[in-house]
Amino acid sequence: MSPILYYGVPSGCSFGSIVALEWSGQPYRLARVNMPEDMQTELFAAINPVRETPALTTARGDFLAESLAILNHIGALPGALDAGISFKQGTPEFDELNRMLAFLNTTFFGSFSSLWWLLEHESDDETKRVLTEYGRMRVVRAHQELERMLGDKRWLLGEQRTLADAYFIGIARWTKYHSVVDRRDYPNLQRLFDQLEADPAVAFAHAIEQQRPAVSTGRFEGEVGIAESVAFRRAA
């Protein structure tokens, strides 16, 4: 059975896992999860009790959740290692990739948390002011650190794209919802962002999210419903 990635819309961080699967050259399917309504169902809770995306049904039929775990699972597939988007565990290259993924998954992702809370909840003016300033400070600091780490390298880890770049693009686009930084103030990150936006796998992931005609350059086998995907897993 091909893996099934449960991706969240609109603009979930699961975007990076779609890009990674496209780059991996491995067959896969997708299951669309409308946030937050689909995540509140008992059916999705059977897939991920935490009721968050992304989640993955592996080729073995196991359920796996959390971006870092899913990306490392994808990275261990032979196709991903052959494509150079990941590295064998125990190597210095793998350690560096894991460090970058951890930074993106905590500092970069987490910097937007108070801003997302404001967008999704009603609050008074003072709460909005405090949380907006707190979020702005964290997002600016995360961009400053990532700008420094990237430097003049072509990709986050050097001369070849990796899982880190796939995850980065899914988070970096969140500035369109939260106007707290201007990416043009960070020329290295802007360069990386533009380079990734021109990538066919990223264009494919955007088209999938927006339900437009999508051209896969990987081995995408189509979309399935959440209920159908659970049935696949039980039959495996």
Image (spheres, rainbow, N blue to C red):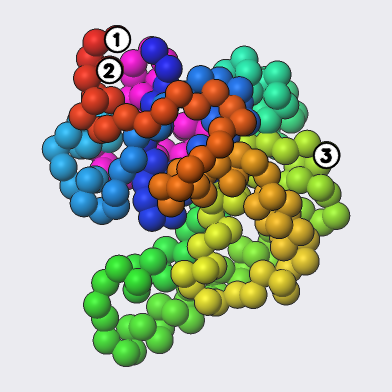
Type of residue at label 3?
A: Glu
Q: How many marks?
A: 3
Is 151 left or right of 143, judged from the image as shown? right
Q: Quadrant of the N terminus?
A: top left
Q: Which residue is mark 2?
A: 232
Q: Residue at image x 24%, y 10%?
A: 235
Note whether residue 19 is visible.
no
Q: Residue at image x 18%, y 47%?
A: 40
Marks 2/3: CA–CA distance: 39 Å
Name the secondary structure under disc 2. helix
Note whether residue 118 is visible.
yes
Q: Which residue is mark 3?
A: 159
Relative to the observer, which residue lies in front, 128 or 215?
Answer: 215
Marks 1/3: CA–CA distance: 39 Å
Picture layout, residue 84 above or below residue 189: above
Asked if disc 1 and disc 2 are in contact, CB closer than 8 Å, the reply is yes
Q: Is residue 62 magenta?
A: yes
Q: Which residue is mark 1?
A: 236
Of circles 2 and 3, the one toward us is: 2
Type of residue at label 2?
A: Phe
Tell which residue pokes out farthest to the right in this image: 152
Is 39 left or right of 103, judged from the image as shown? left
Of circles 1 and 3, the one toward us is: 1
